[in-house]
Image (cartoon, rainbow, N blue to C red):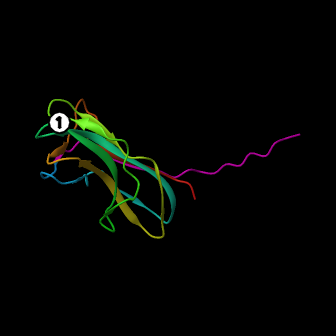
């Protein structure tokens, strides 16, 4: 008996940048250099990047920022990691299902625990920030 194979193209969008962006002290860092626009539908989105801390060791986390509404996507922050002044730390969001009804732009966001200052910065040609999305519906 012959099986039926259905083929459905998968829409994938991504952005990455090696541009350095420095946040302000005691603030989140919105990494606008890696921005994607999602069209109407449901998407699975992940974002991240490489950061250093300009003031000392501090916990950090990565998430997803909705540039259209100027709000962080709820529950998008991944696990915390210690950031330092001497080496890059990779901060990554959780994969999040996001449904939009019209074109909406998103980018990575990085935050720190204390009164420190983060810088998204490329090393060895890696991404200072990136974001990816797969359309699932």
Q: Is residue 17 visible?
A: no
At a point 59% along the width and 51% down the height, the residue shown is 9
- Picture quadrant of residue 51: top left
Percent coordinates x, y for residue 135 in the rendering = 52, 55
Considering the image in quadrants, where does the N terminus appear? top right
Q: Is residue 55 above or below residue 28?
A: above
Percent coordinates x, y for residue 69 in the rendering = 33, 68
For this rendering, which residue is in front, 88 or 132?
88
Q: Is residue 97 above or below residue 3?
A: below
Q: Which residue is mark 1?
A: 57
Binning the other alpha carbons within 10 Å of mark 1 as few (below 14), some (14 to 19) or many (20 upward) gives some
For this rendering, which residue is in front, 58 or 18?
58
Q: On the picture, is 27 further left or further right than 39? A: left
Percent coordinates x, y for residue 17 in the rendering = 27, 45
- Span shown in magenta: 1-21
Q: Is residue 40 magenta?
A: no
Considering the image in quadrants, where does the C terminus appear? bottom right
């Amino acid at each position: 008996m012959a099986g039926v194979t259905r083929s459905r193209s998968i829409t994938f969008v991504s952005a990455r940048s090696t541009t350095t962006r420095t946040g302000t002290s005691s603030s989140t860092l919105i990494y606008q250099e890696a921005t994607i626009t999602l069209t109407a539908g449901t998407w699975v989105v992940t974002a991240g990047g490489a950061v250093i801390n300009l003031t000392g060791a501090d916990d950090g986390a990565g998430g997803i920022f909705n540039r259209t509404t100027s709000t962080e996507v709820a529950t998008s922050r991944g696990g915390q990691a210690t950031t330092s002044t001497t080496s890059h730390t990779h901060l990554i969001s959780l994969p999040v299902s996001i449904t939009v009804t019209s074109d909406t732009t998103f980018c990575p966001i990085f935050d720190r625990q204390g009164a420190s200052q983060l810088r998204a910065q490329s090393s060895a040609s890696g991404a200072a920030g990136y974001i990816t999305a797969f359309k699932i519906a």
